[in-house]
Structure formats: C-alpha cells, structure tokens
Image: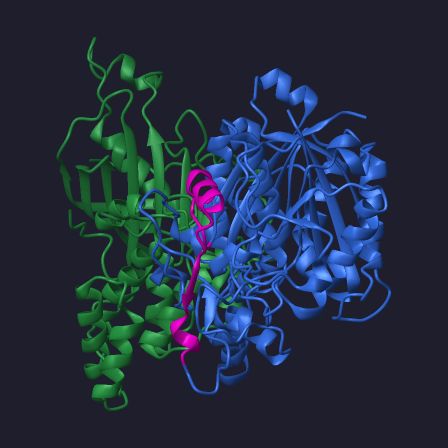
Chain colours: A green, B blue
Amino acid sequence: MPDPVQSNPGGNKTLTLATKPFAPDDEAALREALKRCSPSTFEAAVQFRKTGNADHMPAVVIGVIERFVEPDLRAKLKDADDDLRLIEDLGIDSLTMMEIVILVEDVLQLSINNDELRNLRTVGDVKTFIDCKIRGLPLPRPTKFLPIEHIGAVMPVQPPFLFLNEASVSSTGANGKYKITGQEFFLQGHFKDNPIMPASIMLEALGQLAVLYLIEGAPTEPGKAIGPNTIFFTGCEGVRAHRMCKPGDILTLSIKPKRMKMPLATFEGSIRVGQEKAVIAEDITLTFAYVESAVAPAAIEAGGQPAPEADASANPPLRVAINA
Amino acid sequence: MPRVYITGVGFVTSIGNDAASVAASLREQRHGFELYPPFQKPEISCKVIGTIKGFSTDSTDPEDWTYPSAYTVKRETIRSMAPHGLYTHCAMLQAIADAKLGDADVSNADTGLFAASGGSPMLTYYHHERLLRLGPARCSPLGIVASIVGTLNFNLVAAFKIQGASTGFSSACASSAHALAYAFEEISLGRQKRMFIAAGEDGNRDAILPFAGMRTLSLQTDPALASRPFDVARDGFVGTGGGTVLVLESEEEVSRRGARPYCELAGWGQASDGYNVAISHPDGTGSRNAMERALKAARISAAEVDYVNAHATSTLIGDVSEARALRSVFGEMGVRPAVSSTKSLTGHGLSLAGAMETGFCAVLMREGFMPGSAHITNLDPACEGLNILRATVPQAPKVVMKNSSGFGGANVALLMRRV
C-alpha cells in the first residue's frame, strides 16, 4: 500500500547528476554485478548510470538489499515501510551489510566509509543515507530507538496521558507504537459498554510523537536545544478518521516534518493498525522555542553516543491538547 | 578410562557420497579417478585426480555452486565456505542423521568439533589477488574465513551451533588422524561426551597442483593405473578432496541413547621421524613407533590386529618406508595381518585422509569385509613379507589399525575394535 507520509525521504525535487558516459562494457559489468537481483533492479541501475537521475536510487538499493535477504523473508520487503529494521526484521548482520554496501558502491559508483554504516538500522536509513551521498548532502543523524523508559524521562506529557509505548526518531521523522489496553480511564465513558479510542486522543498521540521528534530528532543550531516545556499545540487541519480503534489494537504512528521555522513546526501524521489506515492528519502545527543547552543537546550525537537522560521531574506535565 | 565409540559417519568422497555407496565401492574395488579437465594442458604433467561427483564448486562465488538436491544450505551459511566446507557440511548432515542425533544432542556444552583441512588455496589466491589489486574496500568481508586454515572449524561450529570444544589440526596428511586422536582424548578424559571429527579438502587444481611442483604426483594418464600403492611401477600419488565427518561418543552416552556403534576407537599413538621436512624416514622409524605406542595404549597385542589400513599413498619412498615399519612391528612378532591401501581407489585426500579412511574402517567392520589394495600388478619386492590383500576378503576384522603420516615426519596410528 503506498503510504503518503513514507515516501521520498530526500525531498521531492528530481535531481540529475553529471555522470560519466555509460559504455556497453559498463552495462555488461553491471549486469554481472546484479545477476542475482531482480530485472527491475538492473533496469533502475542502468537508468541511474545513464541519466544520473537520483529518483532511480531507491529501487536499486531495495533491489540490492532484497538479493541479500533469505528468500523466506523477502516478502517483508515488498510492502516495507521505511521503518523496517535490517537486523531484527530482515536478518541482515553486519557482515551482510558490508556485502550490500560493496555492491551498492559498485553499482552506484559511490564510496562509503565503515564509520558511516554503523548507524544504519532501517531500510529508510539506508535510502536516506544513499540519497544524501548521491546528492552530496550532509549525512542525516541516525535513527534512534527509544524505549518507554526513555520516552517517559524526556517527555513533558506523563501517564496516564502518555500514548506512546515505543518510538524511533531520526532527523527525517518519527515512528511510534501504542497498544490500546482497554484500561485507559476515558474508555469507561467512550462509549457506554462500547470502548472505542477517541479520535481526539489519537490526534493527541500523533502530537506527542511530534513533541518527541522536536526534543530528540529535530536539527538545531549548536549550543541550542528545543525546550520541552516550550512546546504547545497551535492547530490541526485535514483530519480524517478511517477506522474505529478498540482495545487490543496496536496503533502504528508516524509523523514527518513538513515545515519548521521558529516558532512553528508543521507535521503530517498518520496512524495505521496493521496495514489498515486509521487516521490521517495533513497538518499538525506545534509552537516551540529554543533554550541554551547546558550540556550536550538532547538530540542524538553523530557518533552514536546515548543522549544524556533528562530528569523527568524538571519537566512539568504539559498539554499538547488537540481540539478535533 | 571410559570407552569411546564411533557412532556415525558421513562421506563426500571420490568413491561415493554416502556410507552405502562408499562401502559398495570399497568392496567391489571401484575407483573414483577421472581425467581432470583443468589438468589437460601441455604444461601440466599430471592428468588424473579422484573427482567429487554431484557437486560443482569451480566458481570463486559460493552462490554459483551446485550440490545434490538432498541438501539445502542457506546463503548466509554457504557464503563463508570453501569448496571443502560444503562437502564436509553435507557429510556432517549425514553423520548427524546416521548417529540419530537431535538438535539438542548436537548443540550443547558437552559436544565439540575438531576439524582438519589445508584451507582453500583457490579462495586464498582469489581474495588475496583482489585485495592487492583493488584494495580492502572492494573485498568480500568473509574472504578470510572462507580461505585460511581453520575455515572448516569456523564454518561448521557456527552452522551447527557447536558449544563444546572446537579447534583445528594442522599436520598435513596426518591432520585428521590427529583430530580423531585428540577427540578420543577429549572424551576419555571426561571433558566431552561427544565429538564430531570433520575433515575436508578442496581437491581441485589449486589444492593438488602444488604437489606436482614437489614431483610427488603420478603422471599416469590411465585413471585405472595412476594410484597403485605397493606396486613396483607406482609413480606418485593421485590427489583427491571431499569431506568426512565421524561422530565419537562416550560409552555412557552410547548406552543412554541406545546408539548402535560401528566400532570402538580403542586407542592411538604418535611419533615423529625427526628426519626430513617432506621425505619419510627410509626405515619408517616414526611410523613404527607410532604403531607400537598405539598398541601399548590400547592394550592390544600385535597378534590381535587383523587388518591394517595403510597410509601408503603410492609414492616411491613412502610406501616402502611404511612396509618396513609394518614388518618391524608385526614381523618380529611372527604375525601377518592383512594390509591394504584404500588410496588405491580414492586417491590421497591429504588432511582428509586419516578421518576418511578411519570412516572406511568403521564401515567395513560393520559390513564385514577387508578391502583389497587395488591396481597391483607386480608387488614391489621391497614390500614383500607382508600380507597385502589384492582382492576383497569377505571376513570381518576384529581389530583394525589405521596409519597416517604427514609432512615433517608426523605419524599417527589409530586402533579400532569390533563391537
């Protein structure tokens, strides 16, 4: 299923790179290098090498990854979102990752350092990484996986009003999961003998994920951080609910920044349950402010060092209320 | 001291890819030699090897290899293998099934694996040439574990989740006899309950041709004449590869599982020639001492030995040297056990030879025959005085000795007893 909030992490512009002329010998070498990949992978690689059009890159990268995944796991790549994890979901170990890189380098004519590989954990990370390499952009910060303990420690929102169980944050967006337990206090009344997750609460959960992105993932200037207690809700547009969500459902939440300029940050957001669309929000806008960061910024360091844990008591509970 | 038994075997050899076909080839004296296509060039003087059938491992890319459909090897497993890694992996699967071992019997702290192989000259060359030409960034991250001596133990220990003792042995053509011997120790000292002994050789151009440089290969062009240990016209050995896995288990484990052993591994001995880096001592002193130590350790008298599976590779000096050692050990006691060299059928498996031929001994003890030494037309007078079998004798030996010798004058003798 095409997912509007997951596509093209590198931006929408079509970029054409100057490339060396593509000789018949090169095509033969490319065919040999990609002989165990799908025909469409080879085609995309030929197009990339002939035209330098970076839009062909994702098909090449996914095709190369697919070739190194055991056949029984390849189905996962077919409908993969960018959050699919290389190690946990696809069984790719660090040595296989190197095999992938060597082939991608060969096919796309890039060179990649070992250090740059350490933080690639998802299919989306790999696509973004290769895209940045091709376009000559600075490399993104790695995706960071946050367990509930970390989320609870850094978020201004706290239980029983925290609707994230786990989350992953990168510089290009955030993904999270929340399981509706049936024990949520508001389900006693919403509705009588018929517990259904309120749409307003689902938008609240998306808002909380956007707050987490601002704290953990958003690019900031050196020495500055976004203050957790400066973040508030301002507006929301284009909201549609597609599916009733009930106890037992696992909400898969995703947000992506669309615009960010102090003091406003606008996100698009979506919630799925399995492969089913549950909620779409075209615009969720939050306000925020920078504060001087006393120590290191809360966001992830490039070297993969864990961010210092903020003291939860220093962040009074705060509202990211949504008027749906 | 607890007794040690051979309870499972697996073979990928020039004379058969399972125990049943190996037994039939030995009994019927069917050899595994062919003219080897890569050697049919004017500058290559030797022409014949013992070929592995049903496998194709010529490519330097393991994903190009083909193998019998009875086996399935995942990409993540085969990618770090040498050709002999694949052969021995398949032999391991046979041995596990043969010994009726479940996953939990294979992967536990009381089960180990000792291996022997000469590494993979083909892959060493391929990866190293690329390394120097293209630089490390363009090289396979697994080139080294597929190539170096030790590749066999690295791969099998990982693939079969071995948790007990593991290491490799390197004494050239005595390697896998040493692996068996020290696996026996591991069990008899109570350190392990079960050991796999895995041995393999690529047996391809790059593994065999260096011995042509040493002028030690047969130059015969007739596959039926090339390997003829003890014959006066022998002119060198015929190379071969493949894989063999044996399962050794303690007496306690055999009775706990109700396993049906092939035979007891009764003891072993070793000694060195202290003579020359590559030439056997003319009097076979190291080999003689190894045999005598094995007999002493196993508390078996020379008169009890019914059959000796000789190391004899069909080289001019080596066969005579071993014949002298045998005459010394047995002749002085006035006994003449049956002697034959199954290398007359398989060729010389180098590091693989000791385990492969011990596997043969296990099978022939159960099947009840002593295989003849093939291709002898005129016995070398220097080998007279021994009871060298020329035809298969349909009689089960009660006690069998297996000799192995390697470069540097390393000699190992193993003793097996019928159950």
Left or right: residue A60 versus residue A90 is left
**How many labels were placed on the picture?**
0
Closer to the camera in the image, A140 or B305? B305
Determine the residue positioned at 75% across, 47% down: B413
Query: Is B39 within the magenta?
Result: yes
Closer to the camera in the image, A7 or A237? A7
Determine the residue positioned at 23% across, 16% down: A195
Tell me if residue B401 can be seen: yes
Q: Position of residue B59 (x, y in %)?
A: 39, 68
Left or right: residue B53 versus residue B344 is left
Determine the residue positioned at 21% across, 8% down: A193
Determine the residue positioned at 28% across, 20% down: A247
Query: Measured along the vertical axis of the image, is residue B414 above or below residue B324?
Result: above
Q: Residue furthest top?
A: A193
Q: Pick the quarter of the image with the C terminus of chain A.
A: top left
Q: Quadrant of residue B171?
A: bottom right
Query: Measured along the vertical axis of the image, is residue B124 above or below residue A303?
Result: below
Left or right: residue B160 versus residue B405 is left
Q: Quadrant of residue A39?
A: bottom left
Query: Is A67 within the magenta?
Result: no
Tell me if residue A295 can be seen: no
Closer to the camera in the image, B25 or B270? B25
Q: Position of residue A278 (x, y in %)?
A: 18, 35
Left or right: residue B13 versus residue B309 is left
Closer to the camera in the image, B193 or B181? B181
Q: Position of residue B355 (x, y in %)?
A: 61, 47
Q: What range is drawn magenta here?
A: B14-40
Q: Position of residue B210 (x, y in %)?
A: 59, 75
